[in-house]
Amino acid sequence: MAFFCTEGYTLCHKGMASSTPLRIQRTVTAATAKQRMLRQLVCSDAPEQALRYCGFRTIAGVDEVGRGALFGPVVAAAVILPDRTRGLASAGLKDSKQLLRKDRERLDRRIRKVALAISVAEVDAETIDRMNIYQATRMAMLAAVQGLPIEPDHLLIDAMRIDHPCRQTKLIYGDSLSLSIAAASVVAKVHRDALMRELDHAHPGYGLASHKGYGTPEHRRALAQHGPSVLHRRTFAPVKAVDPNAVIEEMVSGELFDLDLEEAADWVSD
């Protein structure tokens, strides 16, 4: 028999007798459990080597950042690494969300030094509001791939597919498993964070340099005080709630995402 209390603990009764003491067992949130799981994954070139075994030679890793932010663009990067990338693995390359800023910037410099090709693309907040964040993310990824100076023969993409004729592999948790995707994750993250620090000067009062446009309590308080700027995503609920010009529209089920339910579930849970 188990009982739950509001403090996030599970009380496990070890018997029916009233004199039996209760054992308090700490539970964790789904987000914490996911982070623990991700830290156990090993980021390597195994996905790339498997593709090379199948005959592919020019493999581009593709990833995005800023999908959940309330402000600014979503940014995608595409990176083609050389065959031998063990130096990046030993340097600690992995999902950018698992790295400190100084480590991301160090790895970004190293990636740019050894990569065969790098491309970064942005899709702005106005476009995100017009077409929804999922489609805007796919657009940014496609633009990043199209901007590569070298034509890839296979794409390794973090949890998504794009409208590109190149052969593709959608890899769930790809930024924690593939060095190419992790490299794209780092490049995109460093690029977007630098952009947010620049935009903090143009749009003071929101704290963009610290939270990078994400919906932190600090950012939400600033939104309530100042209202949204021209670069806020006005279709996102926290922004819409404080936007005096917002028009609340009911979305018909299935209209928000133009994708199959299985793909939507994979993407939203990421």
Image (cartoon, helix red, strand yellow):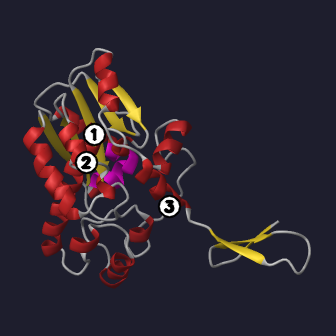
Q: Residue furthest top?
A: 55
Task: Give the position of the N terminus as an image quadrant.
Answer: bottom right
Residue behind mark 1 = 179
Tell me what residue is drawn at x 45 percent, y 49 percent.
270
- Secondary structure mostly seen in magenta is helix
Question: Along the line of sight, which residue is nearer the eye, 136 or 26?
Answer: 26
Q: Quadrant of residue 2?
A: bottom right
- Assign a secondary structure to mark 2: loop
Left or right: 240, with 183 as reference point: right
The image shows residue 14 at horizontal and vertical percentages of 82, 69
* Mark positioned earlier in the residue sequence (3 or 1): 3
Tell me what residue is drawn at x 25 percent, y 56 percent.
73
Single out the mark in the foreground, 3 or 1.
1
Label drawn at residue 93: 2
Label 2 with label 1: CB-CB less than 8 Å: yes
The image shows residue 253 at horizontal and vertical percentages of 58, 48
Tell me what residue is drawn at x 21 percent, y 56 percent.
104
Please report the bounds of the magenta region as a residue range: 126-137
Label 2 packing within 10 angstroms: few (<14), some (14-19), many (20+): many
Check disc 2 and give the amino acid type: Leu
Label drawn at residue 31: 3
- Assign a secondary structure to mark 3: helix
* Mark positioned earlier in the residue sequence (2 or 1): 2
Reply yes or no: does residue 133 show up in magenta: yes
Label 3 with label 2: CB-CB less than 8 Å: no
The image shows residue 167 at horizontal and vertical percentages of 32, 22
Residue 236 in the image: above or below residue 112? below
